[in-house]
Image (tube, grey):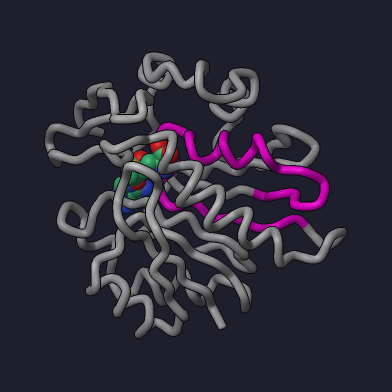
Amino acid sequence: MQELEVQHTDDGSATLFVPALDEHYHSVKGAYTEALHIYRDCAYLYAAEQHTVGERPLRLLEIGFGTGLNAVVTAMVATAQRSVHYIALEKYPVVPDLVRSLGYDKWVDAELFAAIHGAPWEQPTDITPHFTLEKRCCDLLGTAIPEEIDIVYFDAFAPEKQPEMWSAEVFARIYQGMRPGGVLTTYCAKGAIRRLLQATGFTVERLAGPIGGKREILRAVKA
Ligand SMILES: C[S@@+](CC[C@H](N)C(=O)[O-])C[C@H]1O[C@@H](n2cnc3c(N)ncnc32)[C@H](O)[C@@H]1O
């Protein structure tokens, strides 16, 4: 992957900057705040509320594992009532030294974060009794989407930077892999992306963004 730099966002948490793309891994308004609000709360906890206790684990797909921040904040709230099988796709794994230099140990459960990064790729690994992680090093564009997905964290780089990740074809494949009632969230609230998700078949709502961050985000639900 290209050269990466650690930078700090407005809530004090760090993110990675990709100079070649002029793009950050998280919102510059707050990396940690974004992970909690857009992904953990608006997707995982929202979907879990509608999940029947005692059913099979929720199957979650993350597009762009990156720093593992979304994964760890999800693992921290996974319980028996909402256990998760978390499948994360990543084309360019971040090297351990760079992960350490983000300083996320001060923000999240450091042991869990280490276990998430220490887990082998391509192999489901129980990180806690309620959180199984399957990191897949692959290119979303050339990979079959896993089946029976309940929740999608769609966290690709911005459409202006990586338009190929935000295509009708990609959303159709994701939709196909989701269960009815499945929930997808993304930080991108652009009209063109909302219309693309609607044309794919999702029911899409605009939600308030994180405090101090973007005005709106999108949540898409498969009927
Ligand atoms: C916005 S960042 C995601 C941040 C991440 N969710 C986190 O919590 O740190 C986008 C991620 O998508 C990854 N990526 C870019 N192109 C990809 C592709 N074609 N397939 C899979 N992952 C890709 C990048 O390497 C990067 O980690």
The image shows residue 190, relative to residue 25, as above or below, that is below
Find residue 210 and report its horizontal and vertical position in percent.
Answer: 40, 47
> Where does the image place residue 16, in percent across and percent down from the top left?
29, 29
User: Is 80 inside the magenta-drawn segment?
Assistant: yes
Which residue is situated farthest in the right direction here?
A: 54
* Residue at 34 percent of width and 35 percent of height: 30
Q: Nearer the viewer, residue 158 or 47?
A: 47
Q: Which residues are magenta?
A: 57-85
Figure quarter occupied by ligand 1 = top left
Query: Is residue 26 in sight in this rendering?
Result: yes
Q: Is residue 189 magenta?
A: no
- Residue 132 position in % (x across, y down): 69, 42
Q: Residue at x 64, y 38 (%)?
A: 75
Query: Image check: 151 left or right of 26?
Result: right
Between 185 and 126, the one lying in front of the other is 185
Question: Front-most of 42 and 154?
Answer: 42
Residue 91 visible in rendering: no
Please identify the quarter of the rendering in which residue 172 is found.
bottom left
Residue drawn at (26%, 33%), measured in percent from left and top? 1
Q: Quadrant of residue 215?
A: bottom left
